[in-house]
Amino acid sequence: DTEVTQTPKHLVMGMTNKKSLKCEQHMGHRAMYWYKQKAKKPPELMFVYSYEKLSINESVPSRFSPECPNSSLLNLHLHALQPEDSALYLCASSQDAREGSYEQYFGPGTRLTVT
Amino acid sequence: AQSVTQLDSQVPVFEEAPVELRCNYSSSVSVYLFWYVQYPNQGLQLLLKYLSGSTLVKGINGFEAEFNKSQTSFHLRKPSVHISDTAEYFCAVTARQLTFGSGTQLTVLP
């Protein structure tokens, strides 16, 4: 199984809402990633978890809060978002974040719209 | 630091014609090179990767790429494209974290 799943597929939320994005993989990978992708742009790295510990935070605003409950699950908690946060949020996993030769497997993404 | 330049933002090509998508990179350390494809409203899928060894790398869906260290390039090629190849293609490099190019929209015309 080389699949990364993400839920929900689409999410519309107001600026005062709290919501969460979920990501799951069962490949035994020990690295998980959140990316943000705006239309017609490449993915931008937000967070990296390595062995369930946050190892990279690319200066992401605190209204985005990641969580890694176990080695298979990754959440992204959203609170007080702005309309400019509307984007496709991609989750990815790889065998080990410390080694760049391991390819990243991407989920299908959550299309987030902030109204 | 590392960076990736995809020289063409859009490439239109007729069905069954060959195509080349160009990618140049720069890095102060040795890197690994990847090509990903993104179909509309989907995530990214790995087409192929270069880690070491033979500079000609074959990937899925009939794509191949050639690593050229002296020209710091990793161009993607396919000898005959299909309508279904219409997608966004991203070149990426990594020493540890992926750095993506800006993407090339390949549109295959009937």
Image (tube, coloured by chain):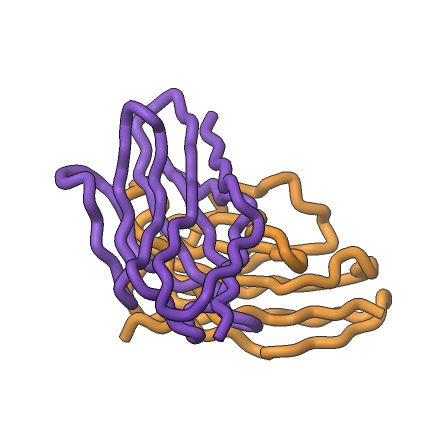
Chain colours: A orange, B purple
The number of numbered badges drawn on the structure is: 0
> Considering depth in this image, is B16 or A30 the residue closer to the camera?
B16
Quadrant location of the N terminus of chain A in the rendered image = bottom left
Residue A81 % position (x, y):
79, 60
Does residue B52 appear left or right of residue A96 in this picture? left
> Considering depth in this image, is B61 or A52 the residue closer to the camera?
B61
- Residue at x-position 54% and y-position 62%: A90
Residue B40 % position (x, y):
55, 71
> Considering depth in this image, is B66 or A66 the residue closer to the camera?
B66
Does residue B80 appear left or right of residue B43 in this picture? left
Does residue A41 appear left or right of residue A71 in this picture? right
Among the 4 quarters of the image, the one containing residue A92: bottom left
Residue A66 % position (x, y):
58, 57
- Toward the top, the furthest residue is B28
Res. A22 visible in picture: no
Quadrant location of the C terminus of chain A in the rendered image = bottom right
Residue B71 % position (x, y):
34, 26
